Image (cartoon, grey):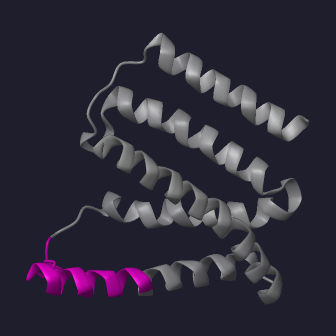
Amino acid sequence: MTGFLWGILGVVAGACIAIQAPINTQLGRALGMPVAAAMISFAAGAVALAAVVVVFSRLQGVAPDWRAPAPWLYFAGGCLGSVYVTAAILLTPRIGAAAVMAFSVAGQLTAGLIIDRIGFMGVAVRELTTGRVVGALLLCAGVVMIRMF
């Protein structure tokens, strides 16, 4: 049952990404600068996450240790996210939300397979099985179908 709930959370998160792209695209149009829309999107997300940190800190009676040293690579997540958000803002009006999501998922899956295979950043190592490769290829075929037909 827990695995099912985690799966639902993943689907909801994916839907949020799909909904976010046209919202940010409209913001980019209104501002006349897509990168500014990405910055505002990240700022809004930072404010929302700060509120969540405050709530959870109080509920758990624990505060984050902001003084803990963090390697530079830990900050790359936000930079990588900004690449995605900016690309989605630029691509959505040009190729459509479904195509942006299809290409994004194909990129995520490809990177995910590599991350699993090498155990990047402590992720559990998982072998590249025939089923996983065929699944990725089927997804790529779906990307082509979504874009071409």
In the image, the segment drawn in magenta is: 48-68
Residue that appears at 60% across and 84% down: 40
Q: Position of residue 82 (x, y in %)?
A: 56, 67
Give the main secondary structure of the magenta stretch: helix
> Relative to 6, does residue 147 appear above or below in the rendering?
above
Task: Please state if 48 lies on the left or on the right of 61 as rendered.
Answer: right
Q: Position of residue 79 (x, y in %)?
A: 49, 65
Q: Is residue 58 magenta?
A: yes
Residue that appears at 70% across and 61% down: 88
Seen as rendered, the residue at the extreme front is 1
Residue that appears at 66% across and 66% down: 19
Count up the numbered dots.
0
Q: Is residue 124 magenta?
A: no
Quadrant in the rendering for residue 47: bottom left
Q: Quadrant of the C terminus?
A: top right
Residue that appears at 25% across and 61% down: 71
Task: Please state if 63 lies on the left or on the right of 9 as rendered.
Answer: left
> Relative to 104, does residue 134 appear above or below in the rendering?
above
Foreground pick, 2 / 139: 2
Instruction: Inspect this view and state whether residue 84 appears.
Output: no
Q: Position of residue 1 (x, y in %)?
A: 30, 42
Quadrant in the rendering for residue 102: top right
Quadrant in the rendering for residue 57: bottom left
Foreground pick, 97 / 113: 97
Task: Please state if 20 lies on the left or on the right of 2 as rendered.
Answer: right
Instruction: Inspect this view and state whether residue 118 appears.
Output: yes
Q: Position of residue 20 (x, y in %)?
A: 64, 69
